[in-house]
Image: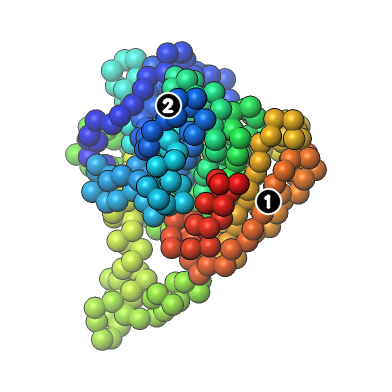
Amino acid sequence: MPNPPAFQSLMLPNPLPLDGGESLSGVQIAYETYGELSPDKSNAILICHALTGDQFVASTHPVTGKEGWWMRMVGPGKPIDTDRFHVICANVIGSCIGSTGPASTADDDAPYAMRFPVITIRDMVRGLVALLDQMDIERLHTVIGGSMGGMQALSLAANWPERADRVLAIATTARHSAQNIAFHEVGRQAIMADPAWRDGDYYGEADAPDAGLAVARMAAHITYLSEDGLTEKFGRRLQDRDAKGFGFDADFQVESYLRYQGSGFTKRFDANSYLYITRAMDYFDLAEEHGGTLAQAFAGHDGGNGTRFCLVSFDTDWLYPTSESRHIVHALNAAGAPVSFVELSAPYGHDSFLLDVPALDRVVKGFLDG
């Protein structure tokens, strides 16, 4: 990806300890805020982004020029109403949109590259909590996240139970399945097999492992969609031709679509960051972090501190199916935590939480207002 523009960021005053036993010094957390913080700081909402997301939840992305990834949900008068709430969205550590990650400069003035320590979802949240500390926000009105963002929301609830009044986790899971890990490994191997990867030391070179990163994105993007959605949108229709080409160009519309998704992704994301973030997701297992029992992860939410939970799944999401959300709900029930749950119908698969699903708007608004 090209050199990014300057991002709004904050340097953490203390080294950030990591689950792997190392620590990071001079950590930058890039973030965006929307809406005014109330005098008593009780209206702060933290939105956690997904794997390839960023802090530009409701503003124009400075690299791509595209509108924010949840612009339909966040803003004045929208379900997450910035006339009422102070919304914070920060880029996770390990990423490449302004927060400290593999492309960042280490103490020797060279990029970390593969010297960057392996991180976890809990490490990402540790950075977010440190950011909130710097903002002097002790307790959030709500922490919200979809997909990997939902993992972060659950991790914050499990490890910092005093930091949020409400937790809204959408299209997510408490741990990665073998299938989830397998898809990520295909993507990582595609990146590492690209000769331009150079064992991660491609910064400053004439070329980057864009071909491998594009393939990784293509493979992952398939998991975000539903079969019915793909069939309805593309079917077996040909791309800009009346007959099969009997070659290996993009004969089918779905092939052209995936190639477009892959090539566009390389313009805004870093291949090493993709390796590190997918590894963090694969390591995620809330039950394992808390003695092997998921209910134990939520033991601090038995009603004493008033934290309320809402879980949302989609009927066409086969990446993190409804059974995963039900598993979390059962654990919250076992822990005595107040929780609501809804499975929504939508044709878009896992990506439904990002797309036009009016029922989700109503759930989000209702949970925040309740």
Q: Residue at x 60, y 41 (%)?
A: 167
Pointer 2 local density, CA inside 10 Å: few below 14, some 14–19, many at least 20? some
Camera-side residue of 116 and 44:
44
Q: Establish if 69 lies above or below 8.
A: below
- Give the labeled residue for mark 1: 340
Viewed as shown, does residue 323 lie left or right of 170? right
Residue 241 location, quadrant: bottom left
Q: Which mark is residue 116?
A: 2
Q: Position of residue 228 (x, y in %)?
A: 50, 74
C-alpha separation, residue under disc 1 versus residue under disc 2: 39 Å
Q: Is residue 27 visible?
A: yes
Residue 72 location, quadrant: bottom left
Give amino acid for label 1.
Ser
Q: Residue furthest left?
A: 206
Q: Establish if 241 lies above or below 187.
A: below
Q: Residue at x 57, y 67 (%)?
A: 345
Q: Establish if 229 lies above or below 360.
A: below
Q: Residue furthest bottom?
A: 242
* Element at label 2: loop
Sequence-wise, the earlier of marks 1 and 2 is 2
Q: Position of residue 239 (x, y in %)?
A: 28, 76
Camera-side residue of 164 and 280:
164
Q: Is residue 194 visible?
A: no
Q: Position of residue 189 (x, y in %)?
A: 45, 47
Give amino acid for label 2.
Phe
Q: Position of residue 136 (x, y in %)?
A: 47, 20
Q: Residue at x 35, y 81 (%)?
A: 237
In the rendered image, the quadrant that contains the N terminus is top left
Of circles 1 and 2, which is in front?
1
Viewed as shown, does residue 191 lie left or right of 365? left
